[in-house]
Image (tube, rainbow, N blue to C red):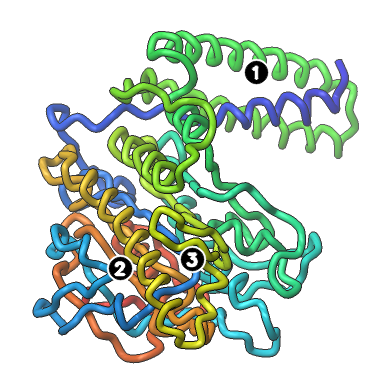
Amino acid sequence: MNQPTINFGRRNFLRGFGASVALPSFRSLGTEVKGAAAARGVTATGAPLRMAYLYVPNGVIMDKWRPEGSGSDFKFNESMKSLNAFKNDLQIIKGLEQANGWAGSDGAGDHARSGATFLTGARPKKTAGSDIRLGISADQMAASHFGSETRLPSLELSCDAVRKSGNCDSGYSCAYQYNMSWRSATQPMTPESNPRLVFERLFGGGSNNERKDGLVKRRAEKRSILDVVMDDARAMNNQLGRNDRQKLDEYITGIREIERRIEKAESFGPPPEPGVAAPEEGVPREYQDHIRLLFDMLLLAFKTDQTRISSFLLAHDGSNRSFSGLGVNEGHHGLSHHRRAQDKMDKIAKIDAFYVRQLSYFLEKMKATEDVDGNTLLHNSMIVWGSGLSDADRHSHDDLPIIVAGNAGGKFLTGRHLELPEKTPLNNLYMRMLRESGAPVDRIGDSSGVLKGI
């Protein structure tokens, strides 16, 4: 038996199997919280607590985006009128800043820094090479604490192609703009843009019966491979020196951990029937269709408790997409350098309203879906919608356009336009979300504490 095949090929194959196929949440089954450990990632009623981070590019035209009035006495401005039906389900927060987005001594590259810092709060190393360095993102901090409660620790989505290398913005690697979720300082979480592949990742390929049969076969194969690997390891033991026996013992410990993960996967039962057909092959031609289909996949993931954590990059910062359906034939990024030209600002406002309509679509679906505790998915969620820039013409990283939708299971005070002190760290909001989810994180980027009063 070839040892490298055992240590590398088989272990990578087994790791690809992952762990768990979760059942959907059924109200009739009830939910019970047992002890502090079980409280991670759930609400006070025991329902799953979801968190999603949704990113839109190139800032907004604040004069048409910012609501009029403050507190509960506010009304939506032109760009956000499509949110009227959800006024009592969200908060618009004024005064948040992502300080590491500013140039400092790094010079140009604000679009790269906007995307890179939005969830990490960390300053990206200015490089277009392979030596990228950033920080762990808020969603992955949550995933490390309670991601094991679901089949997928987290779900990363994007309407853009995958890019992890190359020079995209003034000497910054493309990895910073095309990946908003980071597992470590050097490892971005690759997002998926193909709705069908998202569906198959959540539920498997084929019909429901085919998915169930495939799961049984995969489990049997994994068990068989583990048996062979363990037999090989035991046979090797007498042929090895002391140090190598120690290494082998560590390897066997890893095998036992894989066994534990498979046992946990089996405890979840068969994959759920999502109740809808798999999307067609490929990416929808129309941008709005693409966004909404990915939102549908995210809704299914939350509804069936396949994951409780997600990030969705609707477009990378610096995106120069045009919107001919809105009568905007110029590129978004080009227009964002408007120099206060009214015609360009009016076109950007149309794009801003387009993106808010996509949020409204998702919130409507979330609010219409009953959760296991009788509340709605939206009630039991924390959804951040925003951009890493406010005024893209000035490349401003303060007074960011941030919407927080959902009640966090009753912990958030919704229905308000909340005005915070200027330059309040956006990371304080993430700290609050992590605190509500039960993830004991002490600091994110320049956070100065847990944001209160939301």
What residue sits right under mark 1 in the picture? 226
Q: Amino acid at mark 1?
A: Leu
Please tell me whether mark 1 or mark 3 is closer to you in this view: 3
- Looking at the picture, tell me which residue is in the foreground, 252 or 47: 47
Please name the residue shown 67% across and 15% down the image: 225
Alpha-carbon distance for marks 3 and 2? Answer: 14 Å
| Picture quarter with the C terminus | bottom left
Which badge, 3 or 2, is on the more N-terminal residue?
A: 3
Mark carried by residue 57? 3
Q: Amino acid at mark 3?
A: Pro
Q: Position of residue 135 (x, y in %)?
A: 60, 66
Q: Secondary structure at mark 3?
A: loop
Do the numbered discs 3 and 2 sit on residues whose CB atoms are within 8 Å?
no
Q: Is residue 285 above or below residue 3?
A: below
Please name the residue shown 32% across and 25% down the image: 274
What residue sits right under mark 2 in the picture? 403
Q: Position of residue 74 (x, y in %)?
A: 13, 78
Please name the residue shown 38% across and 70% down the image: 431
- Looking at the picture, tell me which residue is in the foreground, 5 or 120: 120
Mark carried by residue 36? none
Res 164 quadrant in image:
bottom right
Q: Position of residue 339 (x, y in %)?
A: 51, 87
Q: Is residue 128 above or below residue 49?
A: below
- Looking at the picture, tell me which residue is in the foreground, 23 or 255: 23
**Other residues around mark 1 within 10 Å, as few (<14) / some (14–19) / many (≥20):** some
Q: Amino acid at mark 2?
A: Ile
Q: Secondary structure at mark 1?
A: helix
Q: Is residue 294 above or below residue 217?
A: below
